[in-house]
Amino acid sequence: MPVNLRGHHLLCMLTYQSRGYTPAFVENYDKVVKRLNAGETIKIVAGPDEICEPMVDSKSHHCHKPRIVERDRLALQEIGGVLGRELHVGDDLMPGPGMIGRLRKAFAKGEIRSACDSCEWADFCTRIAVKNFRGVVLGMADRDLP
């Protein structure tokens, strides 16, 4: 069964280090990344996804806000450029070492960061990229990096 992810979470997963909004959020995200590490495919979805699940019912959370939908659009556009294909809701991706490695390299160079503008996690993610993604949970591409 594929892991359902919205566009900007394709970027977030690159720097994820078991930190997040709440303990339930982190526990859920860890489970999602474990599935990806086990080789499950990704299905791109519109709106809240499997990572959002613990936060969806929170009135104060941002899962449904227009600026987050715009982040999804920007992320899909830039990631598609790196992968050499247009990405759309409903598409499937196989997140193997090659794909994750290419995305991490582009992320570190700032080539796929438009969706990160105004994100509260942007500086945190930048520090992780600068440290060559040490300590990330999604481990498929570590050996692909220079």
Image: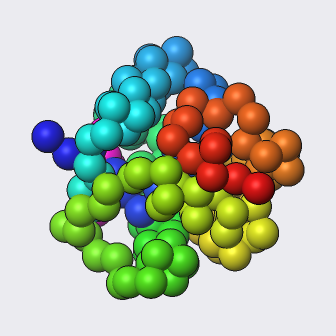
Q: Quadrant of residue 94?
A: bottom left
* Residue 41 visible in the picture: yes
In this view, the residue in front, 84 or 10, is: 84
Q: Please determine whether, in this image, residue 60 is positioned above or below residue 98.
A: above
Residue 49 in percent (x, y) is at 31, 46
Residue 13 in percent (x, y) is at 53, 45
* Residue 9 visible in the picture: no
Quadrant, the C terminus: bottom right
Quadrant, the N terminus: top left
The secondary structure making up most of the magenta span is loop
Q: Residue at x 31, y 61 (%)?
A: 93
* Colour convention of the picture: rainbow
Q: Residue at x 31, y 40 (%)?
A: 39
Q: Quadrant of residue 92?
A: bottom left
In this view, the residue in front, 33 or 67, is: 33
Is 51 left or right of 141, judged from the image as shown? left
In this view, the residue in front, 63 or 2, is: 2
Numbered range of the magenta stretch: 46-50
Q: Please determine whether, in this image, residue 124 is positioned above or below residue 98.
A: above
